[in-house]
Image: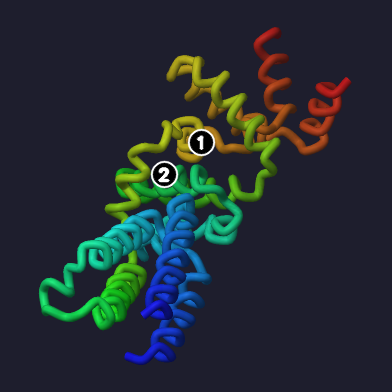
Amino acid sequence: MSAADLDRLAHRLGRQLGRGGLSPYQARRLAEARERALNMVAGGYWRRLVGWSAAPALPLALVATLLVVVVAGLVPGTDDQASQEVAEVQPFTVDYGLLVDDLPIDAYLDEGFRQWLATRADS
Amino acid sequence: MAGHARRLLILLATISSWTAFGQSDPPFWRDLSPTMQGVLGPIEGEWAGMDAERRRKWIAIGQHYDTLTPAEQQNLLSRMRAWVRLSPRERERARDRYRQWLAIPAEQRQALRERWEEYQNLPPEERARIRADDHR
């Protein structure tokens, strides 16, 4: 892969990343991919593995990073991951209670109803 | 060599900054399963404007959907449509009143439901008069 190819690939990836819209799960996978790529470069993993010099190892690590990033970014998260995140959310009893209560929401908002109830209780 | 290293650093910096941005992002509508999207359909239009906490609250509510009877499910969907039409002030007022009325014993809450239906059957002008009296 030439330097120009790498530039084009980096630009395409940058545009894709710039669109945003990742879930925390996808973001975590990207962070892991980044960590792996840094380890590859710092530890010379590929160089030791195939006996290459540092020069070709860098683009190879870059391509590996891109592949991991693209796969991690394209595989959507599931409700299971969302469930784990939701488990940490504070109780929502009031909103949920309002949504499933015997009384409609209008009953809670109608000041006339509250006044009418008070009048009946007094009589 | 230096060119490759520079490009790699730029790419990693791009990924790093974007990942940090992504970690603070809430669940996106497209990340939800088709089932969850169906349940939360009434609030889809509001989703883009919600912060992470609100989105997760709605997902938590959606996860309870399967535990409800069909009638309760229909009721929930109807209430969700009504809820998203309320202003933040109205929502807070409904929450406050709900908290107050939670203290009412169960048998009296049933009576409250009957009273609401009775109140709804009052002539509109009578209800308007009651509301006007309340504002004096």
Hey, what amino acid is under mark 2? Ile
Q: How far across and how far down the image is residue A60, in percent?
A: 26, 80
For mark 1, give the secondary structure.
helix
Mark sitting on residue A95: 1
In this view, the residue in front, B117 or B99, is B99
Up/down of B7 relative to B79, above or below: below
Q: Look at 11% across and 74% down and name the residue there.
A: A49
Locate residue B115: give its quadrant.
top right
Left or right: A15 with respect to A63?
Answer: right
Looking at the image, the residue that sits furthest to the right is B136
Q: How far across and how far down the image is residue B87, in percent?
A: 69, 43
Please give the chain letter of the residue carrying mark 1. A
Locate residue B91: give its quadrant.
top right
Q: How far across and how far down the image is residue A100, in percent?
A: 46, 38
Question: Decide: marks 2, 1 in contact (CB < 8 A)?
Answer: yes
Circle 2 residue:
B61
Classify mark 1: residues with Cα within 10 Å, few (<14), some (14-19) or many (20+).
Answer: some
For mark 2, give the secondary structure.
helix
In this view, the residue in front, A65 or B60, is A65
Please give the chain letter of the residue carrying mark 2. B
Left or right: A96 with respect to A116?
Answer: left
Up/down of A2 relative to B119, above or below: below
Colour mapping used in the image = rainbow
Hey, what amino acid is under mark 1? Asp
Give the position of the N terminus of chain A as an image quadrant: bottom left
Up/down of B80 relative to A115, above or below: below
